[in-house]
Image (cartoon, grey):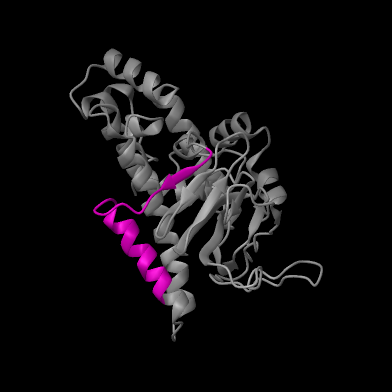
Amino acid sequence: MDVLSDAVGAARTGHPTSYRVEFRAPWGRRFPSVPGAGFHVVLEGSAWLIGPGAEPVAVGVGDVVLFPHGHAHGMAGHPDAPLLPMAYVLPDDTRPTAQATVHVGPDQESPDHEGPGGPVTVMLCGLYRFARERPHPLLRDLPDVIHLPAQLGRHPGLRATVDLLATELDAPRAGSSAAITALLDLLLVHLLRARLDDDPAAGWGSALADPIVGPALRAMHDEPAKPWTVRELGGLAGASRAAFARRFKRLVGQGPLGYLTWWRMTLAADLLRRSDAPLAVVSRQIGYTSEYAFANAFRREYGTSPGRYRVLRGSP
C-alpha cells in the first residue's frame, strides 16, 4: 500500500455518508463540527462558503469543499444571509449506507422550500468519520478548509468522480447504494491527491515528493514488519546514513526509526480495534518477534497495554 492509502485507511472508523440537499433562495445554513471530515459538492446553482474569521468565498457548480478536521462553517445563497442550524446526518457504523434522508423538524424551515421561488442550489453534503487520537501527519497537517474549484482540465479524476456521483443521485438504479459508497471513498482519495498535486511543497507533500525521503516512506509502508535500518532506508535513494537521517527528520518531523515505530503502533492499534487476532499474531505482523517487547512499545505510545486498549476500544 502507498502512504496516502495507509493514512486514510488507518484514520477511517466508519462508513461515509452523503445526502442531496436542495436549497431555494434565500437560504443559509450553519453546519456544526463533526468527528471526521465534512464535505460539500455543488451540483447546481451557486453558494457562499462562510468560515469563522474569513471572508466569504464563492462556490460554483462542480466545486468541492473539504473540511479535513470537521470544523464548523456556514453555507449560504448570499454572503450576508442569516445562518439557520443544519445538522449532518452521521454515518451508521453498522452498515455501508451512502445515502441518508434528511428529516427536518416542524420547528425548522424545510431546505426544499426556503423561499417563494428564488434560484435553486443543489449540493451533495456528507462526511467521513475519522479517528482523532493519533492522526497520521499527512492528514493532521492539512489546512482547515480545502476549496477545489471546477477548473477545466484540472484534476480530471476528481471531476469524473463528481459527475458519476451526480448521475447516481439524480437517477438511482439497482446497485446505486453500493456505487455511491464506492464513489464517496474515491472522492476522498481524489480530494487528497488534488491537494498534494496543487501544493506539493506544503506539509507532508514535500516529504512524499522528496527523491530521498519519499522512497524510504513508501518502503516502510510497503513492509512495516521488515527490520529496517537507517542505512538501508537511506541507501534506497543512494544517500549516506547521516545525510538521510537529517533530511528525513527535517521533512517528517522525527527520525526514520521513530517514525517506523510510530507507524507500527498505529497499525497495531488498528488491528486491535478491528480484529480478534491474538496479541502474538499482532506483534509478528508489525515486526516484533517478542510479544513482551511489543507490549512495552505499545504502552509507551498509548499509555496502556495492548490487551487493555482492545477492551476499551472494543473488538469484533
> Is 62 on the left-hand or right-hand side of 96?
left
Looking at the picture, how far across and down is residue 60, in whole percent?
43, 56
93 in magenta: no
Q: Residue at x 45, y 71 (%)?
A: 180
Given residues 227 and 266, the one toward you in this image is 266
> Is 71 on the left-hand or right-hand side of 219?
right
Looking at this view, name the residue that lies furthest to the top. Answer: 242
Q: Residue at x 32, y 18 (%)?
A: 247
201, above or below 273, in the image:
above
Looking at this view, name the residue that lies furthest to the bottom. Answer: 174
Looking at the picture, how far across and down is residue 99, in whole percent?
55, 72
Q: Residue at x 61, y 28 (%)?
A: 300
Given residues 239 and 166, the one toward you in this image is 166
Q: Residue at x 31, y 63 (%)?
A: 160
Looking at the picture, how far across and down is residue 269, in whole percent?
57, 45
Given residues 253 and 98, the one toward you in this image is 98
Q: Quadrant of the C terminus?
A: bottom right
Looking at this view, name the residue that lies furthest to the right. Answer: 107
> Is 108 on the left-hand or right-hand side of 14?
right
Q: Is residue 99 visible?
A: yes
79, above or below 144, in the image:
below
The magenta segment is 144-167
